[in-house]
Structure formats: structure tokens, C-alpha cells
Image (spheres, rainbow, N blue to C red):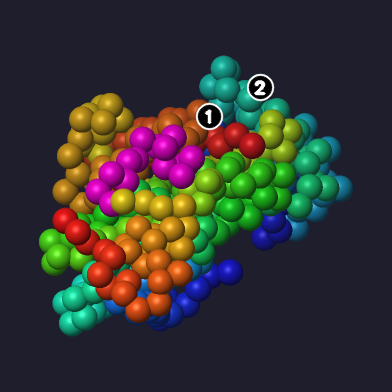
Amino acid sequence: MSELERALTVLLDRYMPAILAQSVKRRALAAVGVAEGQLRDEHLPTLRRQLESGIRLFVDAGAQSGLMAEIDALCSGRVASAEAAVVPVRVEADIVEARGRARELMMALGGGAFPTQRAATVASELARNIVAYAGEGVLELIPRPERPLLTIVARDQGPGIADVEAILEGRYRSKTGLGMGLRGVQRLAARFELSTSARGTRVEADLAI
Amino acid sequence: MQRDAGNEIPILELWGRLVVPLQGDITDTQMEALQERVLRRVRARAPSGLVLDATGVWMMDSHLCAVMGRLASAARLMGTRPVLSGLSPTIVMTLQTMGIELTSVETTVSLEAALELLGVWPDEDDDEEETDDER
Ligand SMILES: Nc1ncnc2c1ncn2[C@@H]1O[C@H](COP(=O)(O)OP(=O)(O)OP(=O)(O)O)[C@@H](O)[C@H]1O
Ligand SMILES: [Mg+2]
């Protein structure tokens, strides 16, 4: 699968359940006459129209324009070198990989020393939490040259976080660390969203340049 | 860019003080192992100070801070004065934004300053042992 197609998949996944995202993508590809895995830059303008009709069906009305804007950015940003990355996270080496990629992408976006440090730190905190508490998961690193910022999404299907409020308000006493990871991520991020349940945790953070 | 996890961080002995030049992208395993080795050395050598030099460190997250703090506290309990030196401005600003305070350990701007704090004076040749620790 091309980087482009992967980036598109990552993008669609963020707006709808994976199974719907998959079918929206498949339908659009079929309509353009491209086999899965064969998507190239020149297909994008046509694909965009096809994706739009699928998105109208499956994505909340309020989120549609946001998603289309991101698809446009993906299309127009094709010349940029910063490609979205998906880092599987399970063992300690993956933490190193995740923060290294976050650093590279922030630099590719033109971020200076401080933004680069912030992005790497956020990736490190989120990846470590996955290894420590969820067992496994993924980090998605999505550069958005048009904003510009780097979106970091951490997803896992672990046991979830018990007392998020206490953690984010700094009232939490960690048994395993300083208990400053998530709160720190929130403070480093321009936008921070956390959803957690017994079926897993998802943290999304925008890192400004 | 990624350092080998098996890479050992060296522990140097300078004028009766232990110096640990932390470098690059430090993995959790490396740091755990280091902590143990440093404490064993502290016990064996009873140095009058321990410098954790972070000049070569590019990133510090809350976990690394915690381990660093624990190492410093343990050294102090064993009777050795710990100093953390050379944190980069970007690391310091990031930790500050996160609300992490490294209060459990004294800090200095450079390795040189850390050694001075521990009573090593570059100008005096022989009697530097006497100049430290008048507590
Ligand atoms: N992905 C996750 N899945 C399940 N529990 C989590 C997850 N992330 C964090 N937690 C829980 O939330 C708590 C707070 O996490 P946070 O990262 O803020 O601090 P910490 O990991 O305990 O310490 P530090 O990050 O400072 O080393 C953790 O102790 C853990 O119980
Ligand atoms: Mg943590």
C-alpha cells in the first residue's frame, strides 16, 4: 500500500469506525477504477469526489467539512515530505521509535527546537503509557502542513483509565511514576482530547509549530 | 539515530567524584541498568559527589525524570551529594510547561559548574579534597 493510501486510511479512520472507513475507501477506489493498494497522486482529484459522497453518508454532519478539509490538505500537501506515520506500540523499542518519528515529522514541518521537543515528549509519554498499562496499541503521527501542526493520536484496547479527572487536575498519585504524563501532554498540546472506557483509550493531541 | 539498547552509559571517576555523561536517546532499560550500576559504584567508591550530566540528552519525559530523581535520592541516602548538570533549554522549558519540577536534585548549568559545586577547583592541584563538604 502506498504512503498516500495509508495516510488516507489513517485519516478516514479518525472520523468513523474502521469498518466504515474501509468501505468508504473501497467504494471510492472502485468508482475511480483503482485496485486497492494502487492509489497514486494523479487519482486524487477524482477520488476526492467519490470519497465525499461516502462521507456524506457515514460521517456526522458537523464533522464532514473538517474531514473534507483534511482530505484537501492531504491532496495539496502531496509535495510536502512529511508523511503520516503509524507506529505500532508494544515494547520499549517502540517508544524510542515513536518519539524519533515525532521528532522527524515536526522537523519536516519546519518546527524549531522547542516544538520538536514537545512533540517527541508527547509521543514518548503516550507510547510509554500504552506499553505500561495497555499492553499494545498504535501511535499515529499526522503532519498537517496547512495549519501547521502535528497531530498525535494514541489508541489502545487496554483496560482504560480509571480516574481521568483526578489525573488531569493533578490530584492523582501514581504508583508507577510521577503521574505527570497525561497532564503534561495536555499542557504541551494546543488541543487535547481523551476518551477512555473499559474497552480502551484514545488520546489525541495537536502540537503546534 | 536510535541507540542500541545494549549500549552502556559509562561511569567516570574524576577527582573522587562520579560523573555519568548521559547521551542521546536513553531507553528505559538503559536507565534501569545505569541506576543499578551507579549505586553499586557509589557504594564501592564512596565518592564525595555524583554528577549526572545531561548535556548530551535530547529528550526527557516524565519517566526519565522520575528515574533520575530516584537515582539522585538514593545516592543522597548513601551519603553522596548528587548534582544534575547541563539540561538543555528546550528540555527545561518542556518540563516546565508540563509542570514537572526536578526539586529533589541540585542542578547546574554545566558539568564544570557541577564539579565546582562539588568542591573541585581547577586552580588548586593537591588539596581539593579538603575544600569540599564543610557541612
Ligand atoms: N493507555 C492507558 N491505558 C490504561 N491506563 C492508563 C493509560 N494511560 C495512563 N493510564 C493510567 O493513568 C495513570 C496516569 O498516567 P500518567 O501518564 O499521567 O502518569 P504515570 O504513567 O502514572 O506516570 P508518569 O507518566 O509520570 O511516569 C497511570 O498511572 C495509569 O494508571
Ligand atoms: Mg505515563
Q: Pointer 1: what residue?
A: A190
Q: Residue A139 appears at what percent x and percent y?
A: 48, 51
Does the magenta-highlighted stretch encompass residue A201?
Answer: no
Q: In the structure shown, which secondary structural element does the residue marked by tag 1 occupy?
A: loop
Does the magenta-highlighted stretch encompass residue B94?
Answer: yes
Most foreground residue, A79 or B67: B67
Q: What is the distance, in whole Å, between disc 1 and disc 2 at their CAs?
A: 21 Å
Of the residues shown, which amino acid type is indicated by label 1? Answer: Ala
Name the residue rendered at 18%, 82% in the picture.
B44
Of the residues shown, which amino acid type is indicated by label 2? Answer: Ser
Most foreground residue, B9 or A85: B9
Q: Which comes before the other along the chain, label 1 or label 2?
A: 2
Crowding at label 2, few (<14), some or many (≥20) Cα neighbours within 10 Å?
Answer: some
Q: Is residue A45 left or right of residue A109?
A: right
* Magenta residue span: B92-105
Name the residue rendered at 40%, 66% in the picture.
B121
Q: Pointer 2: what residue?
A: A65
Name the residue rendered at 53%, 29% in the picture.
A190
Q: Residue A154 appears at what percent x and percent y?
A: 44, 45
